[in-house]
Amino acid sequence: MATSTRIVQSADAYICRNLLTDFRFDLIIAQSTTSLVKHIEAIMTDKSKQDFLDVFPEFRLMSDELLAEIFASARRQTIPAGQHVYSEGDLCQLFLFLLSGEIRVYKTGASGKEITLYDITSGETCIVNASCILSGAQAPANALAQTECDALLLPSHVFQRLAGKYEEVRSFVFKVLAINIANVMSLVEEVAFERMDERLADYLMEKARDGKLQTTHQKIANDLGTSREVVSRLLKDFERQGKLVLSRNLITLN
């Protein structure tokens, strides 16, 4: 009887040791998996940070504290071509830093006719986006991804806090605002006082040979007495309408 008891006790001890070993093994695996996930997340954060600083080099001069706050809340996202970043009437919930791609900001009239306000490309932000977040107003225009875009997105409340806390952020916003106001003022002049689209269309028809014109946007702007930005915007509109094809220093009429 004593022998049987000892056998049972030995078996129980063996089972307990194996269960404890399995538990420790599972715990080690769980801890290793958690560490691996954290390591991957750290690598992704470091890569996003480096990509951000490559595209927005002015932030290299800003404090480590500011950058740490940005990357603690920001997320990286791919925006498919053809997707709206925001639409007229939206409350902007995210501030966008465009790492790559192109976004068109445009207004739609009552007739359904669209007019491009400006394009956002790599290394740029959207002043409509920024102004709506800072003022709490609804978006007065639409933003559409023309190509697949890679963006860093910052929650609006974080952007508001950083703009209030850091002078560097405010200076960055004012710089973007100044550039975009100049571009929008050119557009207002074009729409209110001239039919630049008609002048540009006549110019292309006159200068083209066999449906092709080798020139630069700056050369056309100089000939028409306007800015290169206005010419580039109108040429892109014509291309969207299928009237021509743009390539480097060459315009092909359809």
Image (cartoon, rainbow, N blue to C red):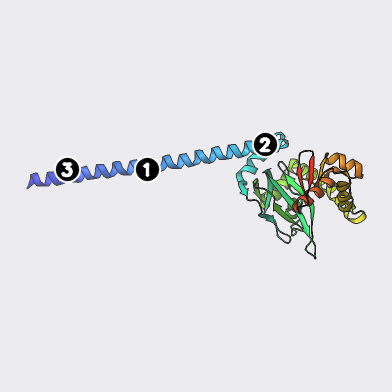
Residue 167 image label: none
Q: To which residue does mark 3 refer?
A: 10
- Image coords of residue 140 (percent x, y): 77, 58
Q: Are marks 3 and 1 in contact (CB under 8 Å)?
A: no
For the residue pair 240 and 114, the one nearer the viewer reads as 240
Q: Amino acid at mark 3?
A: Ser
For the residue pair 190 and 20, the one nearer the viewer reads as 190
Tag 3: Cα neighbours inside 10 Å, few (<14), some, or many (≥20)?
few
Distance, label 3 to label 1, CA atoms, is: 26 Å
Mark 2 or mark 1: name the one nearer the start of the chain: 1
Q: Amino acid at mark 1?
A: Leu
Task: Name the residue furthest top.
Answer: 61
- Image coords of residue 103 (percent x, y): 71, 49
Q: Is label 1 in a helix, a strand or a loop?
A: helix
User: Looking at the picture, does residue 83 appear above or below residue 247?
Assistant: below
Q: Are marks 3 and 2 in contact (CB under 8 Å)?
A: no
Task: Name the residue furthest front.
Answer: 210
Mark 3 or mark 2: name the one nearer the start of the chain: 3
- Image coords of residue 31 (percent x, y): 42, 41
Q: To which residue does mark 1 refer?
A: 27
> Which callout, 2 or 1, points to the residue nearer the camera?
2
For the residue pair 140 and 192, the one nearer the viewer reads as 192
User: Looking at the picture, does residue 248 appear above or below residue 195?
Assistant: above
Q: Amino acid at mark 2?
A: Leu
Q: To which residue does mark 2 refer?
A: 53
Task: Name the residue furthest left.
Answer: 1
Q: Which residue is rendered at x = 63% and y = 40% of the image?
A: 68
Q: Is label 3 in a helix, a strand or a loop?
A: helix
